[in-house]
């Protein structure tokens, strides 16, 4: 069974659910939710990836007065640090025109694909407002403290999400204690199904004489120059960036990133 984990490559919580700046009334009213503000790499628009296959159940705010928010649920039950069931997730503050605004209700976002980038819709600095819980959720409701909170069974994120230490670098957990995902477990939905009975590992070579840059998934920053004829392991073909470019998600010398697939052979 797949495990549910935090979906950013860098965890930097700038406000936990008890934060007095804007979250205290969320977590201390009735009903309550437990939001965290996640800023990823400082000052940039880092990506939030689907840890498992997730279905879009609601999108609100694009082009109107409400703050941009997407609601998702896992396609099937997953294991969390405290329960096994369907998990719901919301991401708020991504910008109009970003990759998230292209999704529609019913779409399934596959494990490893980008759900959203940090944004400033309804905010003053790039970040994502993240909430999660058990079961089903597709709307807001006003609580007794006057805060608009997520409907459904909301839970603190450390009860819902593991930290995948092979994927996420924890810079600041905001004082919350998250459990690490067990090392010997790999989410099966992150793998390509293979019915041939042969290995599904696919490799390509860099076809550019002057080499090809391996870039970060969350912000396209250059990681390293891969030399001509260097071998890469393809993790996902036709990976779509926020600007709509088609890339391949690859691993090179133990580092995961993306590169322009037209220059691989």
Image (spheres, rainbow, N blue to C red):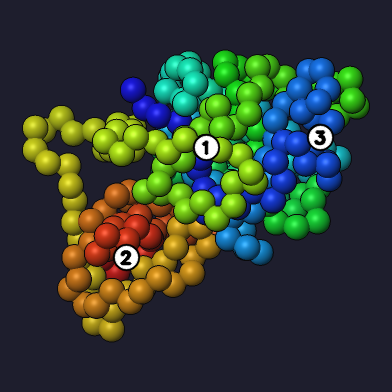
Residue 209 in the image, given as x and y percentages of width and height: 24, 82
Give the residue displayed 58% in from the left and 60% down from the top: 41
Q: Which residue is mark 1?
A: 178
**Label whose residue precedes the other's in the sequence (3 or 1):** 3
Is residue 29 something that shows in the picture?
yes
Foreground mark, 2 or 1, reads 1
Q: x, y (%) of residue 189? A: 34, 32
Q: Relative to residue 247, is residue 68 drawn left or right?
A: right
Q: Nearer the viewer, residue 89 or 248?
A: 89
* Residue bearing the label numbered 3: 24
The foreground one among 139 and 106 is 139
Residue 187 x/y as whole percent: 33, 33
What label does residue 14 carry, if any? none
Q: Are marks 3 and 2 in contact (CB under 8 Å)?
A: no
Query: Is tag 3's residue or tag 2's residue first in the polypeptide sequence?
Result: 3
Q: Image point 56% across, 32% down: which residue?
A: 158
* Residue 207, horizontal then vertical, whole percent: 23, 73
The numbered mark at residue 262 is: 2
Task: Tell me if 121 is positioned left or right of 157 in this view.
Answer: right
Badge 1 element: loop
Tell me the CA gap for discs 3 and 1: 20 Å
Q: Determine crowd level at label 3: few under 14, some 14-19, many 20+ residues with C-alpha closer than 10 A.
A: many
Q: At numbered mark 2, what does the secondary structure look like: helix, strand or loop?
A: helix
The residue at 36%/64% (across/down) is: 259
Which residue corresponds to the image point at 52% horizontal and 37% vertical from the top-left? 178
Q: Quadrant of the C terminus?
A: bottom left
Q: From the image, which quarter does the N terminus lie in?
A: top left
Disc 3 from disc 2: Cα separation: 49 Å
Residue 73 seen:
no
State the separation of the CA atoms marked 2 and 1.
40 Å
Q: Secondary structure at mark 3?
A: helix
């Amino acid at each position: 069974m797949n495990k549910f984990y935090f979906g950013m490559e860098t965890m930097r919580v700038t406000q936990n659910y008890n934060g007095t700046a804007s979250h205290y009334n969320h977590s201390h009213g009735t009903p309550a939710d437990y939001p965290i503000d996640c800023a990823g790499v400082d000052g940039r628009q880092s990506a939030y990836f689907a840890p498992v296959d997730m279905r879009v159940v609601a999108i609100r705010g694009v082009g109107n007065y409400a703050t941009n928010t997407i609601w998702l649920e896992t396609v099937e039950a997953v294991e969390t640090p405290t329960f096994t069931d369907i998990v719901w997730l919301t991401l708020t503050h991504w910008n109009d025109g970003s990759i998230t605004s292209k999704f529609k209700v019913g779409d399934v976002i596959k494990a490893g694909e980008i759900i959203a980038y940090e944004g400033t819709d309804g905010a003053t600095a790039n970040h994502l407002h993240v909430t999660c819980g058990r079961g089903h959720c597709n709307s807001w409701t006003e609580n007794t403290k006057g805060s608009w909170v997520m409907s459904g069974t909301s839970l603190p994120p450390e009860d819902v999400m593991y930290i995948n230490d092979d994927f996420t670098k924890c810079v600041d957990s905001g004082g919350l204690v998250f459990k690490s995902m067990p090392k010997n477990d790999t989410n099966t939905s992150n793998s390509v199904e293979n019915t041939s009975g042969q290995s599904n590992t696919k490799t390509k070579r860099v076809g550019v004489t002057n080499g090809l840059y391996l870039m970060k998934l969350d912000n396209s920053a250059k990681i390293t120059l891969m030399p001509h004829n260097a071998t890469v392991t393809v993790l996902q073909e036709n990976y779509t960036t926020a600007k709509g470019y088609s890339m391949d998600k690859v691993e090179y010398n133990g580092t995961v990133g993306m590169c322009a697939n037209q220059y691989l052979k």
